[in-house]
């Protein structure tokens, strides 16, 4: 029998851009019957497009907005929900390098790195923590079970090294496997599951030369006709939905990268 989440509610954060992971996750959850709280920081035309594509599955879609790095806005978001979400996917994130350049003074250099740390950690870590704790609080209060997903970076997990001052981004994503395990230990016996999904490269950077793409294909232990170094948002969303559906899995982090060995050293 096909799996169904009919009657359940799912919150997907940072889901307001068509064809990206958040939108793909929301669309797939809607196809298995879940009603969707579709979040982005602000209302846009792109967000309305995602709302329409998710609603096409015949479920209820509630667009919701707010800066998830601010406790008051997270509180307002959850208090406006008609019922606590049964599924939460912490998808909101940024990929921001420190804006440094030659000729900076030491003070300017440190401030640039501080901005990178503050912005990456606020969006990639702090917002996920606040959303998760709000969901746990309300699920427990309602005596409901639920599942909460964190999205990480498979490249970092496999000891990949990003160029161009992205250490702050790396720090903001590396917490996920240990935190997923910790939260499962704390709340799993009360029916709340915590899962991590570490994404491989979703789309090729605009600066990636063909030589890098070919090199990355050789890193994947799959038959030639299946070699896809760029997973695409749909593939990652499928993995997340399938993992959510395994009710006996808790405190687990899944790597979704095709089994890549991540040996590429070429500049992107």
Image (tube, helix red, strand yellow):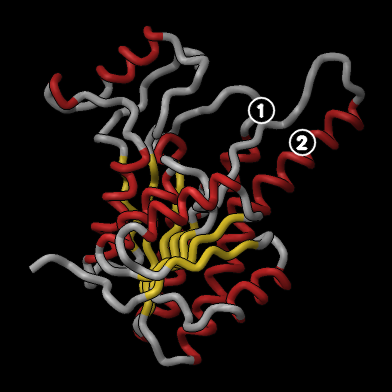
- Residue 110 placement (x, y as % from top left): 83, 34
Vertical comparison of 164 with 27: above or below: above
Return the residue at label 1: 165
Disc 1 and disc 2 in contact, CB within 8 angstroms: yes
- In this rendered view, identify the residue nearer to me: 36 or 52: 52
Residue under the point 51% across and 44% down? 17
Q: Secondary structure at mark 1?
A: loop
Q: Which type of secondary structure does the marked residue at label 2 adopt?
A: helix
| Quarter of the picture holding the N terminus | bottom left
Q: Residue at x 58, y 65 (%)?
A: 64
| Label annotation for residue 124 | none
Instruction: Give the residue pinned by disc 2.
Output: 113
Using residue 67 as the reference point, say whether residue 240 is left or right of it.
left
> Mark 1, residues whose alpha carbon is within 10 Å: few (<14), some, or many (≥20)?
some
- Does 24 sit above or below residue 133? above
Relative to 20, say whether 2 is above or below.
below
Residue pictured at 27% horizontal, 19% vertical: 217
* Direction from residue 99 to residue 262 in the image, left or right: left
Which one is earlier in the sequence, the residue at label 1 or at label 2?
2
Q: Position of residue 15 (x, y in %)?
A: 50, 52
Q: Position of residue 22 (x, y in %)?
A: 45, 50
Circle 2 crowding by C-alpha within 10 Å: few under 14, some 14–19, many from 20: some
Q: CA distance from mark 1 to mark 2?
A: 8 Å
Which residue is pictured at 51% across the width and 76% down the height?
135
Residue 267 position (above or below residue 149): above
């Amino acid at each position: 029998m096909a799996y169904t989440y009919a009657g359940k509610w799912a919150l997907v954060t940072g889901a307001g851009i068509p064809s990206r992971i958040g939108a793909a996750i929301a669309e797939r959850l809607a196809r298995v019957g879940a009603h969707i709280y579709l979040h982005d920081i602000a209302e846009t035309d792109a967000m309305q497009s995602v709302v329409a594509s998710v609603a096409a599955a015949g479920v209820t879609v509630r667009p919701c907005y707010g800066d998830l790095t601010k406790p008051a806005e997270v509180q307002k978001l959850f208090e406006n929900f008609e019922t606590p979400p049964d599924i939460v996917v912490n998808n909101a994130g940024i990929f921001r390098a420190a804006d440094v350049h030659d000729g900076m003074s030491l003070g300017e250099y440190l401030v640039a790195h501080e901005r990178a740390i503050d912005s990456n950690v606020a969006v990639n870590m702090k917002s996920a923590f606040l959303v998760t704790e709000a969901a746990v609080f309300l699920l427990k209060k309602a005596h409901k079970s639920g599942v909460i997903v964190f999205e990480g970076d498979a490249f970092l997990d496999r000891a990949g090294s990003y160029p161009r001052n992205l250490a702050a981004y790396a720090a903001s994503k590396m917490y996920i496997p240990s935190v997923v395990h910790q939260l499962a230990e704390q709340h799993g016996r009360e029916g709340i599951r915590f899962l991590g999904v570490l994404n491989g490269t979703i789309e090729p950077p605009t600066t990636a030369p063909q030589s890098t793409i070919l090199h990355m294909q050789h890193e994947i232990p799959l038959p030639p006709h299946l070699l896809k170094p760029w997973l695409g948002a749909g593939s990652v969303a499928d993995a997340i939905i399938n993992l959510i559906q395994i009710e006996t899995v808790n405190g687990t982090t899944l790597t979704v990268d095709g089994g890549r060995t991540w040996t590429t050293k070429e500049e992107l």
